[in-house]
């Protein structure tokens, strides 16, 4: 269980008084669940993610895994950014980018090569292992970033609007890939987005945030059967009702 407990974050900018970005944010991500953070641009979604993965210290409150407070980046988490190209080393092949995260992991070179190959196969990039990131499309770069997180062996995947910069068809393909991989490998996922349809389609729970300073407006359970389908699931009454409820919350 990943828990976010009474999280607050304030900044001091240009010598002025503190600016509050987060105000008493609390929610939980059960093991194996897919939870989305949804809110307007600039509301603090990425700030929450940085606090969760230990890259930023909250002003008050805490983040914990199974009751253990996070004070630095934990080994059981992997963070996948929106701009995959910026997070991949352009001078290394896709295969070597994956192997890089394994350099301090125990195991023989052969075992690490097998791990990298398995991660590439899981995201459909086996045939592109010897390509460089700049030779890949944006969607393939995101697949490579996801493969790196899988190879690292993280139980918890944190994704910061990873599909925001790809076209609609590629987005749907990546959404289905992520949902499939998360289910098959029993990953816990905390996913940041500002797209209502994406949040409802992917999630078990959608945590809706208010404008800054961010608070939790509601945590909605998404009662849609899995596996989900890009057409059939989006036509279900439960999908449409959830979408309508979230839209109303964001307009308050």
Image (cartoon, rainbow, N blue to C red):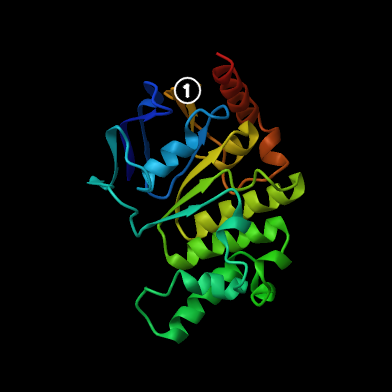
Rendered position, 72 above or below 89? above
Give percent across and percent down for residue 10: 36, 28
Residue at screen point 39% across, 26% down: 15
Is disc 1 surrounded by few (<14), some (14 to 19) or many (20+) residues within 10 Å? Answer: some
Q: Which residue is mark 1?
A: 212
Q: Is residue 111 visible?
A: yes
Task: Return the residue found at the far top.
Answer: 252
Q: Quadrant of residue 93?
A: bottom right
**Residue 55 drawn above or below residue 108:** above
Query: Going 70% across and 56% down the picture, which residue do you hit?
Result: 138
Mark 1: which secondary structure? loop
Quadrant of the rendering where the N terminus is positioned: top left
User: What count of labels does the image hold?
Assistant: 1
Q: Position of residue 140 (x, y in %)?
A: 68, 61
Q: Quadrant of residue 131?
A: bottom right
Residue 65 in picture, x, y percent from top left = 29, 48
> Residue 7: horizontal and vertical position, in percent?
33, 31
Residue at figure coordinates x 44%, y 82% from the top left? 111
Residue occupying the far front of the picture: 15
Report the quarter where the C terminus lies: top right
Taking the image as shown, residue 71 lies to the left or right of residue 98, namely left
Can you see residue 205?
no
């Amino acid at each position: 269980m990943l828990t976010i407990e009474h999280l607050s974050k304030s900044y001091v900018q240009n010598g002025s008084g503190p600016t509050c970005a987060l105000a008493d944010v609390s929610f939980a991500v059960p093991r194996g669940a897919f939870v989305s953070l949804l809110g307007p641009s600039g509301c603090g979604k990425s700030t929450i993610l940085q606090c969760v993965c230990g890259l930023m210290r909250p002003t008050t409150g805490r983040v914990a895994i199974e009751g253990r407070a996070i004070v630095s980046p934990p080994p059981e988490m992997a963070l996948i950014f929106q701009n995959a190209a910026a997070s991949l080393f352009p001078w290394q092949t896709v295969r070597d980018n994956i192997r890089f995260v394994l350099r301090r992991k125990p195991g023989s070179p052969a075992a690490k090569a097998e791990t990298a190959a398995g991660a590439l196969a899981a995201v459909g990039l086996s045939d592109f292992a010897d390509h460089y990131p700049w030779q890949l499309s944006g969607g393939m770069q995101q697949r490579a970033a996801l493969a790196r997180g899988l190879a690292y062996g993280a139980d918890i995947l944190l994704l910061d609007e990873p599909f925001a910069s790809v076209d609609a068809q590629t987005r749907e393909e990546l959404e289905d890939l992520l949902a499939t991989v998360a289910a098959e490998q029993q990953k816990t996922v905390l996913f940041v987005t500002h797209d209502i349809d994406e949040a409802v389609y992917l999630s078990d729970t959608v945590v809706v945030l208010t404008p800054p300073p961010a608070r939790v407006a509601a945590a909605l359970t998404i009662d849609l059967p899995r596996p989900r389908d890009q057409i059939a699931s989006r036509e279900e009454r439960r999908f449409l009702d959830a979408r309508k409820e979230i839209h109303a919350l964001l307009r308050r």
